[in-house]
Image (spheres, helix red, strand yellow):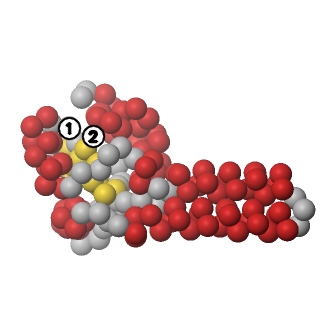
């Protein structure tokens, strides 16, 4: 559980340390602005930036029932962030699996990515695509 939040905690801690240093230097406004920047980074790197995550078995059952794609991701992955934010509200149309929270999800990714935990990995209609083209995936999600 802590592993998923490590980058978030690190960014928030750095922000507080920078604020304290700027306050000691007599620059409270600069410190406050820098703290806000670090807190924004902490939010972006947190699991909260993604739709609710589910375990791999639950996602596979749901996908079999409704046909929607499964996206395997992990916190702090810049490619996952790029995919997530390029989708906007369409991201809610997919089932999201955090591979750091679910070992079965990590195993599913390794099975299709030559033993690597390369994310994002999208499974759509039984076909797995590692690091999919964002425009292609957006178009796929529009049909759901």
Determine which quarter of the picture holds residue 3.
bottom left
| Residue 103 in the image, given as x and y percentages of width and height | 22, 67
Q: Residue at x 75, y 51 (%)?
A: 33
Quarter in which the N terminus is drawn: bottom left
Q: Residue at x 40, y 64 (%)?
A: 4
Instruction: For label 1, count other residues whose C-alpha is less than 10 Å away and answer few (under 14), some (14-19) or many (20+).
Output: many
The circle drawn on residue 68 is 1
When the figure is inspected, residue 67 is found, relative to residue 15, above or below; the finding is above
| Residue 85 in the image, given as x and y percentages of width and height | 47, 42
Is 44 on the left or on the right of 59, as rendered?
right
Using the numbered discs, state the Cα–Cα distance from disc 2 to disc 1 in whole angstroms: 6 Å
| Residue 69 in the image, given as x and y percentages of width and height | 22, 42
* The furthest residue to the bottom: 115
Residues at circles 2 and 1 in contact by the CB criterion of under 8 Å: yes
Considering only order in the chain, which callout, 1 or 2, is on the residue closer to the N terminus?
Answer: 1
Q: Which residue is mark 2?
A: 94
Quarter in which the C terminus is drawn: top left
| Residue situated in front as seen by the camera: 17 or 59 | 17
């Amino acid at each position: 559980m802590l592993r998923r939040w490590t980058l978030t905690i690190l960014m928030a801690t750095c922000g507080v340390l920078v604020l304290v240093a700027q306050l000691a230097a007599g620059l409270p406004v600069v410190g406050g602005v820098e703290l806000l920047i670090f807190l924004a980074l902490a939010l972006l790197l947190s699991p909260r930036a993604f739709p609710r995550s589910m375990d791999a078995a639950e996602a596979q059952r749901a996908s079999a029932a409704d046909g929607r794609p499964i996206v395997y991701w992990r916190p702090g992955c810049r490619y996952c962030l790029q995919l997530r934010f390029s989708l906007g509200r369409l991201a809610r149309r997919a089932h999201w699996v955090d591979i750091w929270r679910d070992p079965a999800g990590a195993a599913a990714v390794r099975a299709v990515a030559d033993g690597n935990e390369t994310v994002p990995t999208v499974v759509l209609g039984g076909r797995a695509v590692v690091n999919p083209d964002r425009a292609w995936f957006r178009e796929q999600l529009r049909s759901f």
